[in-house]
Image: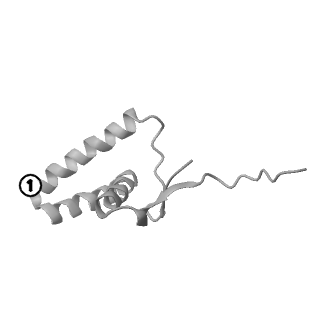
């Protein structure tokens, strides 16, 4: 008896569409932040639009600190997928 051991990749843990609005936005903004300077500028702009210039700037700094904590102290290296990806994590 033989089994097909082709490497299909991991199975998704879940999908963004299964999350509430706050959770989905959190995933999207974490992905954007990891995508580079232009995407980080978009996050800052979105925060300022939603919260005003002062609070938006403070929120962006807090978000940067949070992301840094995830990247520095996570159980595994932070390997963010494409922003457009619909699934969450893999097992």
Relative to 54, 80 lies left or right: right
Give the crowd class for mark 1: few <14, some 14-19, many >=20 residues within 10 Å.
few
Q: How many marks?
A: 1
The x and y percentages for residue 84 are 45, 65
Quadrant assignment, res 8: bottom right
Quadrant assignment, res 17: bottom left
Quadrant assignment, res 72: top left
Relative to 4, 73 lies left or right: left
Picture residue at 33% right of the left edge, 62% below the top: 20
Q: Residue furthest right?
A: 1
Picture residue at 48% right of the left edge, 64% below the top: 86
Q: Which residue is mark 1?
A: 54
The x and y percentages for residue 47 are 20, 60
Picture residue at 32% right of the left edge, 55% below the top: 26
For label 1, the SS is helix
Q: Residue furthest front?
A: 1
The x and y percentages for residue 24 are 35, 61
The x and y percentages for residue 81 are 48, 55
Picture residue at 38% right of the left edge, 61% below the top: 19
Instruction: Tell me which colouring the rendered structure shows.
Output: one colour
Relative to 4, 59 lies left or right: left
Question: Looking at the picture, does residue 48 appear above or below residue 34?
Answer: below
């Amino acid at each position: 008896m033989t089994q097909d051991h082709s490497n299909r990749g991991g199975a998704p843990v879940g999908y963004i569409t299964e999350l509430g609005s706050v959770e989905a936005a959190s995933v999207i903004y974490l992905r954007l932040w990891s995508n580079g300077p232009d995407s980080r500028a978009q996050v800052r702009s979105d925060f300022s639009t939603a919260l005003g210039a002062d609070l938006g700037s403070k929120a962006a700094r807090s978000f940067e600190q949070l992301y840094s904590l995830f990247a520095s102290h996570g159980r595994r290296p932070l390997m963010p997928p494409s922003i457009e990806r619909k699934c969450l994590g893999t097992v």
